[in-house]
Amino acid sequence: MSESDGFIDEVTDELRRDRLFAAMRRWAPVAVLVILLIVGGTAWNEWRKARDQTAMQARGDALAAAIDGGDPARLREAAGDGPVALLLAGGAGDVGALRALAADPAQPALYRDLAAIRLADAAPGDPMVDDLLLSAAAPGAPYRLLAEERLAYADAAAGNPATALTRLQAILVDAEASADLRTRAAQAIVALGGTPEGL
């Protein structure tokens, strides 16, 4: 290698080094800004999560205190608006809250059906309940089998034991029925004078 080649290589290396330093001076503030944004965004996100967690904990504590107190008005105040608040108020004895939730088509079917089932337990014999339970017992409904069970109890209370037995037998053979539900259905069948089939 000649001296001129060594000199050219040395100049080329110096040019590369100068370009690298120029690029670093040009882009270093951008890199620092990106790093600061990432760190700042992460810190803000963690702060927001902690704030939300604290708020949820406080709301849960208020709900627990209201549930322990058993006062429907206090429970509604602690739970705020929405279907869960109405369900909790209904569980504390506010039948009107359950009736309002079960009959409100603007609420999700999941909550309406659950309210209808809880209303059947809280206000047996209410004529509105049977219509709501029929809707909750529709195929594909999330609480279909529980609604069928309540309808069977309503049929038995209304003096229609044959219809009640038919509903309860259908629950026994349904693949979606839980073991507890099957046990309750079998016990109700025996109480109505029938024989459980399909166990």
Image: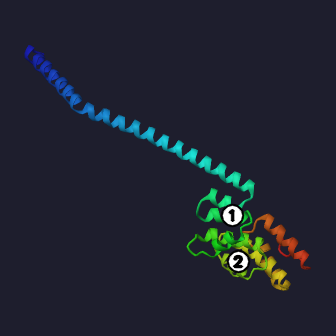
- Splitting the image into 4 quarters, where does residue 69 fall? bottom right
Foreground of the two, 4 or 31 = 31
First in residue order: circle 1 vs circle 2: 1
- Splitting the image into 4 quarters, where does residue 79 fall? bottom right
Mark 1–mark 2 Cα distance, whole angstroms, equals 20 Å
Q: Residue 199, position in %: x, y?
A: 84, 71
Foreground of the two, 67 or 187 = 67
Q: Residue at x 80, y 82 (%)?
A: 155
**Three-letter amino acid code at the position of disc 1:** Ala
Foreground of the two, 26 or 95 = 95
Task: Please identify the quadrant where the N terminus is shown.
Answer: top left
Q: Is residue 39 shown to the viewer in this render?
A: yes
Q: Residue 184, position in %: x, y?
A: 83, 69
Q: Is residue 169 shown to the viewer in this render?
A: no
**Three-letter amino acid code at the position of disc 2:** Leu
Q: Is residue 34 left or right of residue 116?
A: left
The residue labelled by disc 2 is 133
Q: Secondary structure at mark 1?
A: helix
Q: Residue at x 36, y 38 (%)?
A: 37
